[in-house]
Amino acid sequence: MPGNPVEDHYTSSDLGAAILAALQRMGKDIDHLTPDDLAPVDEFHGGQRAATIRLAGLLGLSGSEQVLDVGSGLGGPSRFLAWRYDVHVSGVDLTAEFVRIAEMLTQRTGLAGKVDYRQGNALDLPFADASFDVVWSQNASMNIADRDRLYGEMRRVLKPGGRLALQEVAAGPGGPPHFPVQWAREPSISFLFSAEVTRAKLEAAGFRVLIWQDTTAEALQSAARRAHTTSSGPPPLGTHLILGEDWRAMFRNSARNLEERRTELFNAILERVGQP
Ligand SMILES: C[S@@+](CC[C@H](N)C(=O)[O-])C[C@H]1O[C@@H](n2cnc3c(N)ncnc32)[C@H](O)[C@@H]1O
């Protein structure tokens, strides 16, 4: 049973069955799926797969890294990184239903030896200090008010010299977002900070910025394309399956919020610095 408002927001009954039914309608063999088959639904962030490829390109992976994906969702980014770069990825997510579906989809893509998931809170990561070479996180912090603790936890589980790869939604100068959005139906579970404040919090937590990139323009292009599907009807497989009945309003507001600079998107690569 979901136990808090954030988990409630992301939990919908029969999501796993709905994803498999959509894949079958598309003629896919649901026992032998690829990360590409799943990308329309399991890359649950602005820009979807293209954004994951962009962030991974900024990061650069050699294949030997142990990676932690914080707020791993249905597991799209983690499976993609394991599949494309041959790294081992652990995912952690607050939403128990997402963790169950991530495990089920990972079995069906044959990646179970390369990726594992556990339910947990990013504010109290269930991993020992200095466990990972890379911490990765896309569009997970919007529901987290205590960013000092979040970034502190990300730093704690990184090895000295380890890197953090982030894609985050930031508050823009245009005012508060229009709701509902994909991460919240109303403001009580939405916590956005400006890019400047976020950067200061990351530096205070013990990170050095290696790359900082505003990707709002790319995110707007992608959000505008998706908003268009609200009139033409959604494809069989897409994130509307996760979002529930008000997905049309969420897609429209995403584009509008970016257009009015109520929200912004950025990518950042940071290095853990300082003493333990
Ligand atoms: C928009 S989804 C993004 C999922 C995934 N990163 C992706 O890009 O496909 C946000 C995710 O963050 C998770 N989340 C929110 N707050 C969290 C917390 N405190 N600890 C762990 N996960 C959290 C949610 O359960 C959800 O799966």
Image: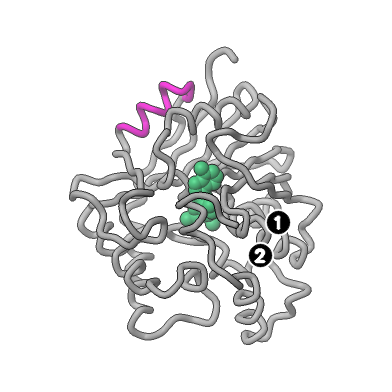
- Between 130 and 191, the residue placed more toward the observer is 191
Badge 1 amino acid:
Trp
Residue 50: percent from left, percent from top = 49, 60
Q: How many marks?
A: 2
Q: Is residue 49 magenta?
A: no
Magenta span covers which residues? 197-207
- Whether residue 186 sits left or right of residue 176 in the image: it is right
Screen quadrant of the C terminus: top right
Tell me, for residue 83, which label it has, or none: 1
Whether residue 51 appears in this view of the structure is no
User: Quadrant of the rendered structure where residue 105 is?
Assistant: bottom right
Q: Earlier in the sequence, mark 2 or mark 1?
A: 2
Q: Residue at x 62, y 36 (%)?
A: 134
Residue 196: percent from left, percent from top = 30, 33
Q: Are marks 2 and 1 in contact (CB under 8 Å)?
A: yes
Residues under labels 2 and 1: Cα distance?
A: 8 Å
Residue 197: percent from left, percent from top = 31, 32
- Whether residue 36 sits left or right of residue 87 in the image: it is left
Badge 2 amino acid:
Pro
Question: Does residue 68 lie above or below 189 as drawn?
Answer: above
Tell me, for residue 35, which label it has, or none: 2
Report the magenta stretch's main SS: helix
Indicate the secondary structure of the residue bearing disc 1: helix
- Whether residue 259 sits left or right of residue 31 in the image: it is left
- Whether residue 191 sits left or right of residue 98 in the image: it is left
Q: Residue at x 74, y 80 (%)?
A: 29
Whether residue 264 appears in this view of the structure is yes
- Between 40 and 141, the residue placed more toward the observer is 141
User: Quadrant of the rendered structure where residue 88 is?
Assistant: top right
